[in-house]
Image: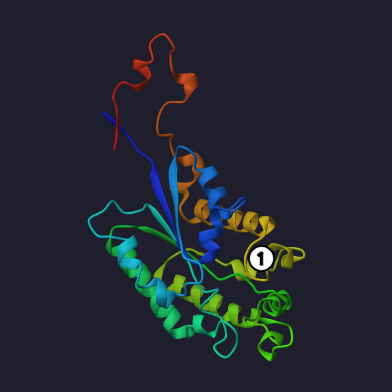
Amino acid sequence: MDEVSRKTFLLFGDSLTQRSFDEGGWGGRLASAYQRKADVIARGYSGYNTRWAAYTLEKIFTKGHVPPDLVTIFFGANDAALPDRLNGRQHVPIEEYVAHLRAFVEHIRSVGTKHIILITPPPVDETVRVQENQQKVGGEQEAAMLPERTNAVAGEYAKAVKQLGEELGIPVVDLWSNIQMQPLWQACLSDGLHFTSTGNAAVYHLVQAKINEALPHLRPDALSMDFPGHADIDASSPDSAFKGTAIS
């Protein structure tokens, strides 16, 4: 019998992944592109840095289970929070951040996944971050007068992801650089950090382009649908269209 199966893509990250299936989200757009060809699953954890995500790793990627065909690893927006400002509890030093990413890759490979894409943290709109902080804790507090994340520091974490990807031979989606190439790139961020619909569209197109370029066998047009299209089913004898197929 011919096997009928879908690929599995797993998105692993923080709130930028957790929210990726909100209306217009980049994960939902990816799932739409792979209808009947791949199941796109989000494992995103709002507020998490790589230190905390490390505790989830073996529960999500379990040896003995069928491994995902593709995994995206998308952390860094929280790791790059400045240690001496609001949200400093999320900060992870860049050397430790890279070590966690390296460990994630090693473990995910060990369970049988061959294809991994690293995604850098996006840029930060510092002006809007200050406005957000002032709304949360009050504009009079000194802590709210400075951004708790800066674009320059986010860029250092993005640079580290790119260097790791080159070292490990893993494709990297450089959001930090590419989003800032967009006209009025700040419109890609709703609160200076998370994505607007425009930002989500940009992320989706960058991720899809990286799949198409680095993993062409996983392009949407390279994958078959899991069962015959309705036009291929003979209404008087539907059995013939399904004969010889089995779900794998």
Instruction: In this rendered view, identify the residue nearer to me: 171 or 35.
Output: 35
Task: Determine the residue positioned at 26% across, 53% down.
Answer: 65
Query: To which quarter of the image does residue 129 belong?
Result: bottom right
Position of the C terminus by quadrant: top left
Where's residue 211, x and y in %? 50, 53
Where's residue 62, x and y in %? 28, 60
Q: In the image, is residue 236 above or below residue 181?
A: above
Instruction: In this rendered view, identify the residue nearer to me: 87 or 118.
Output: 87
Does residue 42 appear to the left or right of 80 in the view shown? left
The residue at which mark 1 appears reads as 179
Where's residue 77, x and y in %? 55, 73
Task: Determine the residue positioned at 28% across, 24% down.
Answer: 244
Where's residue 164, x and y in %? 45, 74
Does residue 160 appear to the left or right of 85 in the view shown? left
Query: To which quarter of the image does residue 239 belong?
Result: top left
Amino acid at dot 1? Ile
Task: Determine the residue positioned at 56% across, 71% down.
Answer: 121
| Name of the residue lying farthest toward the left | 64
Instruction: In this rendered view, identify the residue nearer to me: 189 or 104.
Output: 189
Task: Determine the residue positioned at 44% across, 40% down.
Answer: 37
Does residue 234 appear to the left or right of 133 in the view shown? left
